[in-house]
Amino acid sequence: MRLAVIGPGAVGGTVAAWLAQNPAHEVVVCARTAFDRLEVETPGGPLSAAPRVLTAPDQATPVDWALIATKTYDAAATGAWLARLVGPATRVAVLQNGVEHVERFTPYLDPTRITPAVVDIPAERAVPGRIRQRRDGSILVPQGPAGEAFVALFAGAPIAVSTTADLKTAAWRKLALNCAGAVSALTLKPSGVARREPIAAIMRALVGECVAVGRAEGADLPDDLAEAVVAGYRAGPGDSINSLHADRAAGRPMELDARNGVIIRRGAAHGIATPVNAMIVALLEAAAA
């Protein structure tokens, strides 16, 4: 299989390194900046791979699978890569945050060719090609032939990749986790900040709004999800830094719309108030400006 991973950040780089361990795969990485190899510190030890690195779309040719792991606000730049990578039989998987995986790329692709993927792989990139993977993690894709073909790509890898009959619920569950992480971006404190009860209360409020909107969208979300999210942050490594926090600290654009803004937008469409998410977004936008 010829595979292309667009966006070798923390998640994309980790996925590319694991896929490259399979000798049946030919992996290329589509990046802004060239690097020599991928070095991932995984829970099971160091992992190394040397996929071919492309730095311009005109270097690309069609592949069997294109895996999109770019930031959500980079859809237009990703579209330029897709124009060269996607051939008549190419399948495309979107490994991004949020709940709008398909909608984000319909300007560039027939939506029936898109496989949305809900990714939970805690990882941090120090510099291009150097990544710390904190947990093996998981990826969920919809049931069906495309989902099953995607799962087969990861045969032998420790990442738990599987299909689900209800990807919408999985995506909103992941969004609940991500929206709470905005407090780390605002305070510039790692996830251990959740152990402070006043911060945990804000996180519960953020998730509570997400649950209300997700249910209106058709997701099956439990009543105790907010408490479970806080418990998860508290039980994890206290020094873990999520991507929103990392991006703000580095002065890069943030995925605010995909992680919190979408809750506000979809909430407004259903007549559901989301004041805590709106406050977090307004404060982070002001801080970034």
Image (spheres, rainbow, N blue to C red):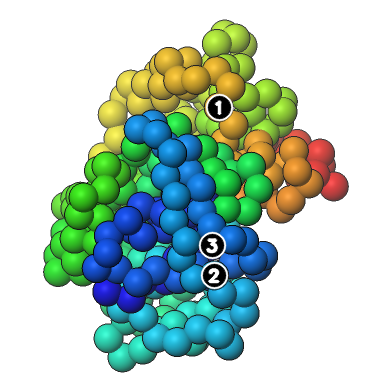
Residues 202 and 160: in front is 160
Kindly identify which residue carries mark 1. 240
Residue at 50%, 84% in the rendered image:
60
Depth order, front residue of 188/229: 188
Q: Is mark 3 on a helix, strand or loop?
A: loop
Q: What residue type is labelled 3?
A: Gly
- Asked if the residue at tag 3 contacts the one at tag 1, i.e. Cβ–Cβ closer than 8 Å, the answer is no
Up-down relation of residue 162 to residue 1 (above or below): above
Which sits in the foreground, 277 or 105?
105
Q: Residue at x 44, y 82 (%)?
A: 85
Q: Residue at x 27, y 64 (%)?
A: 23
Residue drawn at (35%, 33%) of the image = 44
Q: Quick one: label 2 or label 1, which is nearer the N terminus?
A: 2
Pinpoint residue 40: horizontal percent, then vertical percent. 48, 44
Q: Mark 2 points at which residue?
A: 53
Q: How crowded is mark 2: few (under 14 residues within 10 Å), some or many (20 or more)?
A: many
Inter-mark Cα distance, 2 to 1: 28 Å
Question: In the image, what residue type sits under mark 2?
Answer: Val
Q: At which x and y percent is residue 10?
A: 53, 47
Q: Position of residue 136 (x, y in %)?
A: 34, 37
The amino acid sitting under disc 1 is Ser
The residue at which mark 3 appears reads as 7
Is disc 1 placed on a helix, strand or loop? loop
In the displayed image of the protein, which residue is found farthest to the right? Answer: 289
- For disc 1, the neighbor class at 10 Å (few under 14, some 14 to 19, many from 20) is some
Locate residue 102: give its quadrant. bottom left
Of tags 3 and 2, the one toward the viewer is: 2
Label 3 vs label 2: CA separation? 11 Å
The one nearer the camera, 89 or 229, is 89
Question: Which of the 4 image quadrants contains residue 46?
Answer: top left
Q: Is residue 258 left or right of residue 212?
A: right
Q: How far apart are marks 1 and 3 (CA)?
A: 21 Å
